[in-house]
Image (spheres, rainbow, N blue to C red):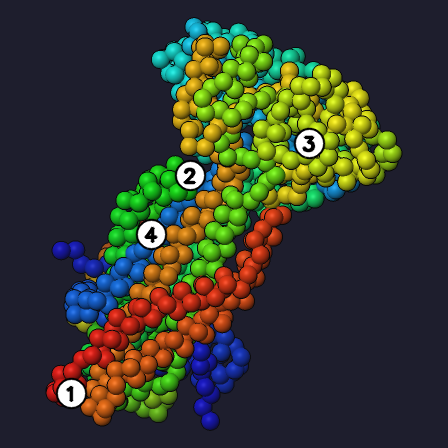
């Protein structure tokens, strides 16, 4: 028996070797193999493999690409056929084009948004090294996490070897600045001189190298310079800074470029930290008034550095309730929520959510494409089978159909780019961003990967499916339409509608929660209340101001107030009789003037408000119900608590109202009578008379406080600002789910048109045999109804789970009632029926003669 | 036009094709070359040389008849062309000419 040469080696050789050489080469190889086999079979085999490998060189390689020598011609032919088929099946082409291009536009919008979110704060050159110091505070109710740290910590940080540099600063706040008696409001902060070493906010070279080194320096942005002086050449000019009763003359030591959009911190000026630190009285290790960012030598040392920093605090503060830790500076924006001291998501959840939605939408559009192309297959069988008979190989057919789908996805991409370009301003409005449509290479990459994704995902199934037909059966007119194929299309429709219903439920729940938040009774009245900051003359003459305001037409009342939506100060420095170690409670602290509670519509559970009749109120305090419960006090009126500013007598208990946000439960609160230190004047306006009242207030303001900018703010707007993120997500979700439903319906429309076309004869015969319109309608929409019902059944549990998860973010939220799901399901069903019925009614009404006359 | 070049190994193979005359095919050339040179040669090298020389017009080829050897695959026989012979002659004359110019050198 002859030995067999290695099978695999021969296969490989035949794959790559030129056909005109193969016989000779193989023959010689086999001959050598047979000779050597007699000596040593193993060696022969090895040698055979080795020799085959040696043939793998240019002279022996097949011309792979010239296998089909008329490659370009074929491509041109494919292109021509594609365009012809677009023209022939115009409605189908349009459905695909509209569906895909809107989907791609949505995806591009989401891409722009997500990209912008992810790039936030990453523009700093030292981004990798920057970490913010956070503090975890534990008390009876759990751990709360703050960005604040004691400002005294900054000077001690030099002892930590892992830290390269550090900077200390305050949050951005709105202040009044004046120059030559003209007053402006501007956002600013205090920072020490290393601020510009740490962060990459750009300074113009004309200014001081170290502009914040002494108390009288200020750095202003280009925009502010233009506003104040009408020029950017302003080094050395003087500006007066005002806050409450304080003033300071400072000199411009530097001008910086406006803060970039990618910065989560937007400010117009920076003043010296030294000035701030010398001005404040609460410089203690127990006060968390500063923000510190450190640049580490090596980001890997984060844990080490944090331990060191924490040790410094522990050394200076006799309390183990506070722990310091480090968080990457650029991570703060996306991961901004904490639950009991642990990171708990934040904006990143919306980034993820929208990425998933983008994928959903694209997927739905691809399903349309797949469904319509496979459905169309019946009409193109002749073309395919003739091609196959003439020798078209399967790859070439696949190639043809992929050309078609890639071409349509390229066309959709162009249309989508136009859509994005046109709608970008609206999108920016809704999303609250300033996205621009620059054609960067990254964007190009994203766009082309979408093209490839859509082209391949949408095109591959039809291409494989169409090219698999048996030409003999096809030409005989027997297209085996197995149950499986129809079932496959139905499954895809079910998936589409399930996804759409999930999105509808999401929209209903988010909208419901939003309107719940807006209308929720917070325990105080926020409508028609305006407030403005006490500055200049209003500090001394506050009594007069309040009295004059009360006289203004349309003003129901006015008071001094320290009430700020979203919080303000909080303190642990409260003692009371019977306080134990475990009772360490953080209280929100509000300073109030006379009549503030009544003006804001807060109700008293017991006792009284601060009023004029009692002149000794400076030593009195009002607590809320939660505080009362937390302190475990009974019959509180008249009892004394020890605040860090002195003993205070409880004169009243106010019913709980929601200060922070509805994300959190109501927390203990004390309200101190301290009109001198309140920061705001609030006024309640008459309903329907607001514009006049504000004009009147402005008049009073201008008269008493000339020069200063009157900038009233509405309390309800502040309140809404708390839920901006949710608000934006809610409106974005509305648009995107609308799109998803639209695209699903487009698909359904196309599919039903196709089904009806195929069944025209059947309908004709049925009508001839006496079927009524209604029974035909029933017959035709039955299939679709079934699919959508299955879609509903699948989507309900999923959407219930998702909605439940989202609502858990709110301490106060709407119940997930059954009607939400019924509405979502019914509306999907209704929209689908509407889509299908346009065509079914037409089909049911056609005269059977017309459909049956030709065969 | 310059005549196509003839590499060293190519020259050896071409000589062998000429020597074996009408019986020259891959394995035969390989075996004779291996005995003459007393070293291992890979068949692929021979094929490469043959293909190149065929392209240059030094040799031409034909298929032999089908036999039961080699799994039924035909042998491909090579013969030298007049042009190939001319190239060999030229190469030979150049070498002899130069060789004769070597003066008598004693290496002792």
| Whole-number angstrom distance, CA of label 4 to CA of label 2 | 18 Å
| Whole-number angstrom distance, CA of label 2 to CA of label 1 | 59 Å
Q: How many marks?
A: 4
The answer, for residue B107, to whether it is visible in the render is no
Q: Nearer the viewer, residue A2 or B22?
A: A2
Q: Badge 4: how crowded within 10 Å, few (<14), some, or many (20+)?
A: many
- In the picture of the structure, the residue carrying the numbered disc 3 is A588
Q: Earlier in the sequence, mark 4 or mark 3?
A: 4
- Marks 3/1 in contact by CB < 8 Å: the verdict is no
| Whole-number angstrom distance, CA of label 3 to CA of label 2 | 31 Å
Element type where label 2 sits in the image: loop
- Which mark lies nearer to you, 3 or 1? 3
Where is A461 relative to A590, above or below? below
| Whole-number angstrom distance, CA of label 4 to CA of label 3 | 47 Å
Task: Name which quarter of the figure residue A390 lies in.
Answer: bottom left
Q: Nearer the viewer, residue A831 or A85?
A: A831
Q: Badge 3: how crowded within 10 Å, few (<14), some, or many (20+)?
A: many
Q: Residue furthest front?
A: A613
- The residue depicted at 49 percent of the width and 10 percent of the height is A704
Q: Nearer the viewer, residue A245 or A590?
A: A590
The answer, for residue A9, to whether it is visible in the render is yes
- In the picture of the structure, the residue carrying the numbered disc 2 is A432
Where is B74 relative to A600, above or below? below
Q: Could you say which disc has been placed on residue A852 in the image?
A: 1
Where is A45 relative to A667, above or below? below
Q: Earlier in the sequence, mark 3 or mark 1?
A: 3
Answer yes or no: are tags 3 and 2 on the same subunit: yes
Where is A339 relative to A798, above or below? above
- The residue depicted at 74 percent of the width and 17 percent of the height is A616
- In the picture of the structure, the residue carrying the numbered disc 4 is A105
Residue A108 in the figure: left or right of residue A19: right
């Amino acid at each position: 028996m002859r030995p067999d040469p290695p099978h695999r080696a021969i296969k490989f050789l035949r794959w790559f070797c030129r056909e005109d050489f193969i016989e000779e080469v193989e023959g010689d190889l086999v001959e050598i193999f047979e000779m050597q086999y007699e000596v040593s079979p193993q060696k022969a085999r090895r040698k055979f493999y080795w020799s085959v490998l040696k043939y793998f060189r240019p002279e022996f390689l097949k011309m792979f690409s010239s296998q089909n020598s008329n490659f370009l011609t074929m491509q041109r032919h494919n292109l021509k056929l594609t365009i012809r088929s677009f023209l022939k099946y115009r409605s189908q082409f349009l459905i695909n084009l509209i569906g895909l291009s809107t989907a791609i536009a949505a995806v591009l919008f989401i891409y722009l948004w997500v990209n912008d979110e992810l790039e936030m704060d990453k523009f700093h050159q030292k981004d990798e090294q920057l970490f913010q110091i956070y503090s975890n505070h534990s008390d009876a109710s759990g751990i709360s996490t703050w960005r604040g740290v004691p400002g005294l910590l900054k000077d001690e940080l030099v002892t930590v070897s892992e830290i390269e540099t550090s900077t200390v600063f305050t949050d951005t706040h709105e202040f009044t600045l004046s120059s030559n008696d003209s007053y402006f409001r501007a956002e600013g902060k205090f920072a020490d001189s290393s601020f510009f070493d740490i962060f990459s906010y750009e300074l113009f070279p004309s200014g001081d190298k170290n502009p914040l080194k002494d108390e009288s320096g200020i750095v202003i942005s280009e925009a502010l310079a233009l506003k104040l002086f009408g020029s950017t050449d302003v080094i050395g000019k003087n500006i007066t800074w005002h806050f409450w009763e304080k003033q300071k003359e400072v000199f411009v030591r530097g001008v910086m470029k406006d803060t970039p959009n990618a910065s989560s911190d937007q400010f117009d000026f920076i003043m010296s930290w030294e000035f701030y630190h010398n001005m404040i009285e609460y410089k203690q290790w127990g006060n968390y008034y500063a923000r510190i960012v450190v640049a580490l030598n090596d980001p890997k040392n984060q844990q080490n550095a944090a331990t060191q920093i924490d040790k410094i605090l522990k050394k200076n503060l006799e309390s183990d309730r506070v722990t310091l830790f480090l968080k990457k500076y650029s991570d703060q924006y996306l991961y901004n929520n904490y639950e009991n001291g642990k990171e708990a998501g934040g904006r990143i959840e919306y980034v993820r959510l929208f990425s998933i939605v983008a994928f959903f939408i694209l997927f739905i559009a691809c399903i349309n494409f797949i469904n319509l192309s496979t459905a169309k297959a019946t009409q193109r069988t002749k073309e395919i089978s003739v091609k196959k008979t003439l020798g078209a190989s399967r790859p070439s057919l696949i190639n043809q159909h992929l050309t078609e789908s890639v071409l349509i996805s390229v066309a959709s991409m162009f249309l989508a780019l136009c859509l994005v370009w046109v709608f970008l301003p609206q999108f920016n409005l809704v999303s609250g961003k300033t996205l621009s449509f620059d054609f960067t290479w990254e964007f190009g990459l994203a766009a082309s990967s979408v093209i490839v994704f859509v082209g391949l995902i949408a095109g591959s199934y039809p291409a494989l499916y169409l090219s698999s037909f048996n030409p003999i059966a096809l030409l005989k007119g027997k297209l085996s339409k197995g149950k499986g194929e129809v079932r496959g299309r139905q499954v895809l429709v079910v998936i589409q509608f399930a996804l759409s219903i999930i999105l509808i439920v999401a929209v209903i729940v988010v909208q419901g929660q939003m309107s719940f938040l807006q209308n929720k009774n917070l325990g105080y009245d926020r409508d028609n209340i305006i407030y403005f900051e006490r500055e200049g003359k209003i500090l001394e003459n506050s009594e007069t101001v309040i009295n004059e305001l009360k006289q203004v037409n349309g003003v129901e009342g006015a008071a001094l107030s320290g009430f700020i939506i979203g919080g303000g100060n909080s303190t642990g420095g409260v003692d009371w009789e019977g306080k134990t170690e475990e009772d360490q409670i953080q209280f929100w602290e509000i300073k109030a003037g006379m009549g503030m509670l009544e003006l804001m519509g807060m109700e008293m559970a017991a006792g009284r408000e601060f009023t004029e009749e009692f002149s000794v109120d400076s030593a009195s305090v009002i607590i809320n119900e939660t505080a009362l419960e937390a302190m475990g006090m009974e019959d509180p009126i008249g009892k004394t608590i020890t605040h860090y500013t002195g003993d205070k007598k409880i004169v009243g208990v106010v019913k709980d109202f929601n200060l922070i946000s509805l994300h959190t439960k109501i927390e203990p609160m004390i309200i101190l009578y301290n009109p001198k230190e309140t920061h705001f004047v609030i006024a309640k306006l008459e309903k329907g008379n607001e514009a006049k009242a504000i004009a009147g207030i402005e008049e009073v303001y201008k008269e008493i406080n000339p020069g200063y900018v009157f900038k009233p703010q509405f309390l309800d707007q502040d309140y809404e600002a708390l839920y901006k993120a949710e608000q934006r997500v809610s409106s974005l979700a509305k648009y995107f789910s609308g799109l998803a439903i639209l695209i699903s319906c487009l698909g359904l429309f196309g599919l039903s048109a196709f089904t009806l076309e195929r069944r025209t004869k059947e309908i004709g015969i049925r009508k001839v045999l006496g079927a009524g319109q209604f029974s035909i309608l029933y017959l035709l929409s039955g299939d679709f109804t079934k699919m959508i019902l299955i879609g509903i059944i699948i989507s309900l549990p999923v959407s219930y789970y998702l909605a439940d998860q989202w609502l858990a973010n709110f301490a106060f939220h709407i119940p997930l009632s059954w009607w939400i799901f019924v509405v979502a399901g019914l509306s999907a069903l209704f929209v689908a029926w509407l889509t299908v019925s346009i065509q079914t009614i037409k089909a049911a009404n056609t005269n059977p003669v017309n459909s049956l006359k030709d065969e | 036009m310059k005549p196509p070049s003839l590499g060293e190994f190519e020259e050896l193979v071409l000589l062998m094709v000429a020597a074996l005359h009408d019986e020259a095919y891959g394995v035969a050339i390989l075996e004779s070359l291996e005995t003459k040179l007393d070293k291992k040669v890979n068949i692929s090298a021979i094929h490469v040389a043959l293909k190149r020389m065929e392209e240059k017009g030094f040799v031409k080829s034909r298929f032999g008849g089908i036999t039961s050897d080699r799994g039924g695959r035909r042998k491909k026989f090579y013969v030298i062309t007049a042009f190939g012979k001319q190239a060999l002659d030229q190469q030979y004359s150049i070498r002899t000419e130069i060789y004769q110019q070597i003066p008598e050198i004693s290496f002792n």
